[in-house]
Image: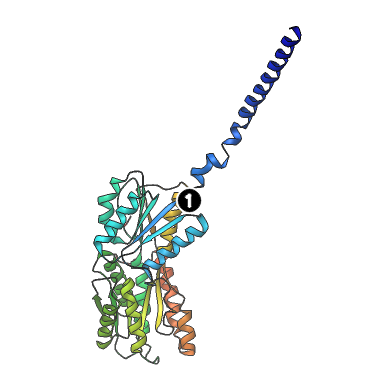
Amino acid sequence: MKKLVAVLLALTLVMAMFAGCGSKSSGSSAPAESGTSESKAPADKPLKVALIYAGFLGDKSFNDSAHEGALRAKEELGIELKEMESKEPTEWESNFVAMAADGYDLVIGVSTQFQEIMTKHCPEFPNTKFALIDGVVEGDNIVSSTFAQNEGSFLAGAAAAMFTTKTDIPGVNADKTIGWVGGMDIPVLHDFFIGYEQGAKYVDPEIKILQSFAGTFNDPLKGKELTIAQYSQGADIVMNVASGTGTGILEAAKEQGKFAVGVDLNQDDVYPGSILTSMLKRVDQATYLAIESVVKGTFEGGKTTYLDISNGGVSLTDMSTMKTALGDKFPQDILDKITELEAKVKSGEIKVNAYEGFGRK
């Protein structure tokens, strides 16, 4: 009996030791468990980002620029990306609401066309973050981006006004007339035009500037028709500010043996030798910065990022494609003058007018 009691006591001691060891192991590993894959799962889950377009990709312009910024974020920041395209305003709204309701962490409206939609629906999703590209919407869960497209267009207008005098270049006539074709008749495009007009008249106060609106950002044929009409009225170079409609503007320049100015992305090599330069509007950078702010935890609702000449938000291309195409006929004086004007705008010596109906922050 005594032997049996001794054995039982020994077993009890062994079990107690094992229990003590288990308790210590659990306690000592608690801090380590905070770094285990199980506890880090929410942090490791990729940020879900949705881009909603008022049009389609493939415009080689505004939408494609936003797409480039999103792809950069996908590659560098590891986000999960979804993009919704449509040319119908009713579908823009339904796409926007669907992505917000589907649990996306950040929903981006790519275009000023989303201002009313976001003003209406963002308050319905207080736990979702939103970004508007090319406009401002107030809200604690919204960031906005705007651009000094008037400053970039000032340089484009100056370049076009100088180019139209280069009659030694085939396709340039003796008329001092330039053109401008926009997509929809909205404030942001008027801001483009007012800068273009000011830049052209800075070079030549007597220059004639033709203006047309296609009424859409998604009709290349309409853009082409309007551009050809301006060529018939004496213009030899036309600025494209029309997103998807603008592909027709560039095509018209090529087919008519005339010239164009590209927009948003570098469009110089779409038809090499037909596009003098492009006004770069860094939609890609605005898109990337909005996504990065959420990934890094610096998202600040109610904030507006302003991109202008001083921070590289707008500029002209270096005209290297046209320089290659024209060879010795390339008008270097235009490039030199643009460099000079850009410095004056940056310094504030030249104040570029802004369209009064287009708000900035």
- Above or below, comparing residue 354 to residue 204 in the picture: above
Q: Secondary structure beneath disc 1?
A: loop
Q: Quadrant of the N terminus?
A: top right
What is the three-letter code of the residue carrying label 1? Answer: Pro
For this view, does 222 lie left or right of residue 310?
left
Residue at the far top in the pictured view: 2
Residue 80 figure quarter? bottom left
Closer-to-camera residue (76/340): 76
Closer-to-camera residue (233/162): 233
- Above or below, comparing residue 98 to residue 190 in the picture: above
Residue under circle 1?
A: 46
At which x and y percent is residue 224? 29, 81
Residue at the far front in the pictured view: 1
Give the total of numbered labels. Answer: 1
Residue 17 figure quarter? top right
For this view, does 47 lie left or right of residue 133?
right
Residue 278 seen in this snapshot: yes
